[in-house]
Image (tube, rainbow, N blue to C red):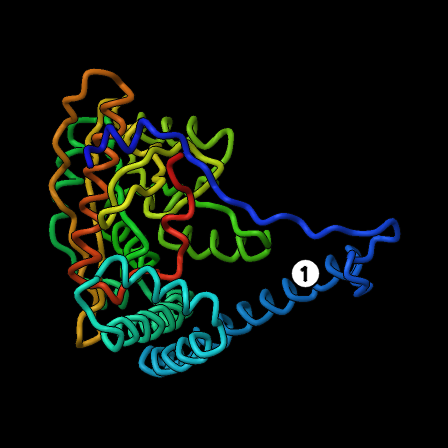
Amino acid sequence: MHVRAFAARRPTTVCPALPKRGADGSRSDGSGYTPGMATRFRELRSDAVYWAVRGFFALGSRLPLAALRRLGTAVGATVLAIARTERARALEHVRVAFPDLDDAGHAELVRRCAAHLGQTLGEVAWLWRASAERVTQLCTMDGAEHLHQAREQGRGAVLVTAHCGNWELLNASLNLAGIPMTIAVRELDDPRLSLLATRLRERFGSDVVPRGVSAGRRLARALVSNRVNGLLIDQDIRDIPSVFVPFFGRPAWTPSGAATLALRLRCPVIPAFIHRQPDGHHHAVVHPPLPLPTGDSDEDKVVELTAAATAAIERQIRQYPEQWVWMHRRWRTRPE
């Protein structure tokens, strides 16, 4: 289906009905489970997650990288075994993307995905103390000249990427390659975890811009200052401007801010990705700028450019399918 046909449809998201409660706050089924109990449970769960992550990073950053990867692989396998909802969702998504695989192939891909994400977690812990020299040794890069050439024009560039490979390592490596990055991020539900993530991302020179009402202005100022904006555009996020574009043959609700910024400030959109190699090293590739859109209206151009960036993401995922987040609800929002 043509990308304009995707964009013309309004999104709809099916939400489950909220459980009915009585006057005393208990569930209608008489369980006695109150909102206050639910709030306290969420607080305890948030505290447990925060201290587990903080402890893992504090202790893990002192371990050798190989040990962290082995630990991460074990964590990934454990989470996959107990997280039934996420496992089922990941299997559903790989069936959509790779219908030619049999059930065993789908299950193996999800298993490798869990191992990859666990290793990524271990590598992120390693990044807390790794020197610039060690990061540069771990990750090689091709195509950085595309970003340097864009900056020679004085208008910066918009770098689009996805949750492929170790995207946190990509951010660090771009800064160490002499590219001043300003990255847009979605804040986590727990502000303490958001602060940890921001400290890590700023460690190698990135300016971190949380998504929100002022994000567009800050990102525009970064481009005017000849910096490179880095945006992950491979997730279905309800509260930011988005359009429908094809992704593995289905319409996917995709953030359009990268295309809008680039068109408004007349700077190139440049895809870049990273992947883990069999020997444990990583390789980042910065691709040439995407072609200028030819649509009749500004809206058509935004859709066309977002579709081109998403097609580049799909090509990367097809090449390294185990290194993407298959449990994400990528097709949650659907056209009416």
Q: Residue at x 37, y 48 (%)?
A: 331
Residue at far front of view: 29
Residue name at image x 59 percent, y 65 percent: 50
**Which x, y percent locates residue 208?**
43, 43
Left or right: where does residue 313 sit relative to residue 29?
left
Q: Residue, x 35% and y 30% (percent of image)? A: 9
- The residue carrying mark 1 is 42
Image quarter in which the C terminus is found: top left
Classify mark 1: helix, strand or loop.
Answer: helix
What residue lies at 83% left-to-right and 53% top-to-bottom? 25
Q: Indicate the position of residue 169 as horizontal and vertical percent values.
A: 31, 59
Seen from the viewer's position, the closer of residues 142 and 43 is 43
Q: Is residue 91 above or below residue 184?
A: below
Comparing 269 with 18, the one in front is 18
Residue 168, image x, y percentages: 35, 57
The residue under label 1 is which amino acid type?
Arg
- Position of 179 relative to 70 (above/below): above
Q: Residues within 10 Å of mark 1 (few under 14, many from 20)?
A: few
Q: Quadrant of the N terminus?
A: top left
Vertical placement of residue 132 versus 188, above or below: below
